[in-house]
Image (cartoon, grey):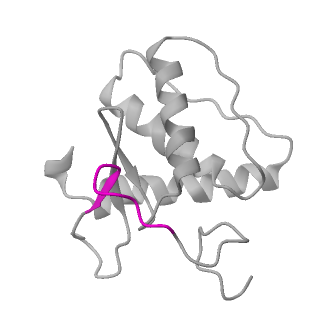
């Protein structure tokens, strides 16, 4: 979709804004076009590289965090285009930063190089939101 903003899943005409309890926008420190926000996922500050989060994305990250807290395995399913990759990366990188002894590395496997390249592009969005666009005091 040429008219769809980057990062917005297809099939959604307008984003649903998160409630104040889910996320809050933070001012940009490097760019006037910053659309990042800081999400509170069960007490964990997660840098989200977009200015909205769908309830399904929030639920996905919450389930992943609770699985990590329990030191267990999890199987999470979501339809194509709902933002699973960015959810996974945002939550894991925040968790790793908050608990470096619990998550020493993240290994991501995929079938093709093209899929890995897309994951790296999304990882760059998350890292930029975390390191460049969100105030240091938030971390």
Q: Quadrant of residue 98?
A: top left
Q: Position of residue 59 (x, y in %)?
A: 53, 40
> In this orientation, which residue lies closer to the viewer: 79 or 137?
79
Looking at the image, residue 79 lies above or below residue 37: above
Looking at the image, residue 69 lies above or below residue 135: above
Q: Quadrant of the C terminus?
A: top left
Q: Position of residue 134 (x, y in %)?
A: 26, 59
State the residue lying farthest toward the top.
Answer: 71
Q: Main secondary structure of the magenta part?
A: loop
Residue at 29% in and 32% down: 43
Instruction: Give the side of residue 36 with respect to residue 54, left or right.
Output: left
Residue at 28% in and 82% down: 32
Q: Position of residue 120 (x, y in %)?
A: 62, 53
Magenta-drawn segment? 16-25
Residue at 34% in and 33% down: 97
23 falls in the magenta region: yes
Instruction: Give the side of residue 111 with respect to residue 8, left or right.
Output: right
Looking at the image, residue 119 lies above or below residue 101: below
Q: Quadrant of the N terminus?
A: bottom right
Instruction: Give the side of residue 16 with respect to residue 109, left or right.
Output: left
> In this orientation, which residue lies closer to the viewer: 38 or 55?
55
């Amino acid at each position: 979709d040429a008219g769809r903003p980057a990062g917005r899943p297809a099939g959604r005409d307008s984003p649903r804004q998160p409630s104040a309890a889910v996320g809050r926008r933070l001012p940009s420190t490097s760019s006037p076009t910053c659309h990042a926000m800081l999400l509170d996922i069960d007490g964990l500050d997660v840098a989200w590289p977009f200015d909205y989060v769908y309830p399904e994305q929030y639920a996905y990250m919450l389930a992943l965090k609770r699985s990590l807290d329990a030191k267990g395995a999890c199987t999470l399913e979501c339809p194509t285009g709902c933002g699973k990759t960015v959810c996974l990366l945002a939550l894991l990188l925040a968790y790793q930063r908050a608990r470096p002894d619990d998550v020493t590395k993240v290994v991501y496997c995929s079938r093709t190089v093209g899929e890995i390249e897309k994951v790296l592009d999304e990882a760059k969005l998350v890292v930029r939101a975390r390191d460049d666009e969100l105030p240091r005091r938030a971390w």
